Amino acid sequence: MEDSQPTVFKGTYRHRIDPKGRIPVPASFRRVLQPEADGRLVVTVLDLCLAVYPPHEWEQLETQLRALPAFRKPVKALTRLLTSRAADCQVDTQGRILLPSVLRGAAGLKNEAVVVGVLNRFEVWSPEAWTGFLDESERLLDDASIDLQWPPPPSAGPPRPQAKPKR
């Protein structure tokens, strides 16, 4: 997938976690994964959820971490947290992944989960943590002044190049 379109996961799905700790990967996510992942995924704890990466996206994250100044405390903390809690997982023939119990516990996952697409990865949240995140994010965005207009204003076509200033 290196020279094709970038990996993009989007959407929100609710799923049950079975007694063995398996959760279905949404069909639209499996279609994104199929070309190159061979059913392999890397799962790690991120904030209050589990972040699930296709192998090539995880490798890009590792490359980014290696490029950071290795002896700075925040870099060491981030690298240790992400990599020490990462696990290689496999999508089974029924399209499920077995989430290791340690990772399920760290994310507060029990019987239900919310699976959320986040561009180059997808996340697995407990329903309570997801609801809390949404509430907090909406409050934050109400208060924030980000230089981003949403929805984007209607445009009359592609932007025109600016003319060179006259001397």
Image: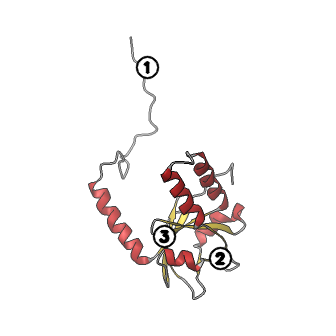
Mark 2 sits on what residue? 95
Spot the residue most to the left: 143
Measuring from the top left, give residue 50's x and y in whole percent: 52, 69
Label 2 or label 1, whichever comes before in sequence order: 2
Mark 1 sits on what residue? 164
Asked if 145 appears above or below 94 in the picture, the reply is above
Q: Circle 3 — which element?
A: strand
Q: Circle 2 — which element?
A: loop
State which quadrant residue 99 falls in.
bottom right
Asked if 16 appears above or below 73 in the picture, the reply is below
Residue type of the residue flagged with mark 3:
Cys
Residue type of the residue flagged with mark 1:
Lys
Measuring from the top left, give residue 117's x and y in whole percent: 51, 65
Q: Marks 3 and 2, how far apart in space? A: 20 Å
Q: Marks 2 and 1, how far apart in space? A: 56 Å
Residue at image location 37% in from the left, 46% down from the top? 154
Mark 3 sits on what residue? 49
State which quadrant residue 143 falls in.
bottom left
Q: Foreground: 49 or 36?
A: 49
Q: Residues within 10 Å of mark 1 (few under 14, many from 20)?
A: few
Q: Foreground: 113 or 159?
A: 113
Measuring from the top left, give residue 41's x and y in whole percent: 65, 67
Label 3 or label 2, whichever comes before in sequence order: 3
Quadrant location of the N terminus in the rendered image: bottom right
Quadrant location of the C terminus in the rendered image: top left
Q: Circle 1 — which element?
A: loop
Asked if residue 18 lies left or right of residue 38, the reply is left
Q: Nearer the viewer, mark 3 or mark 2?
A: 3
Residue 25 in sight in this render: yes
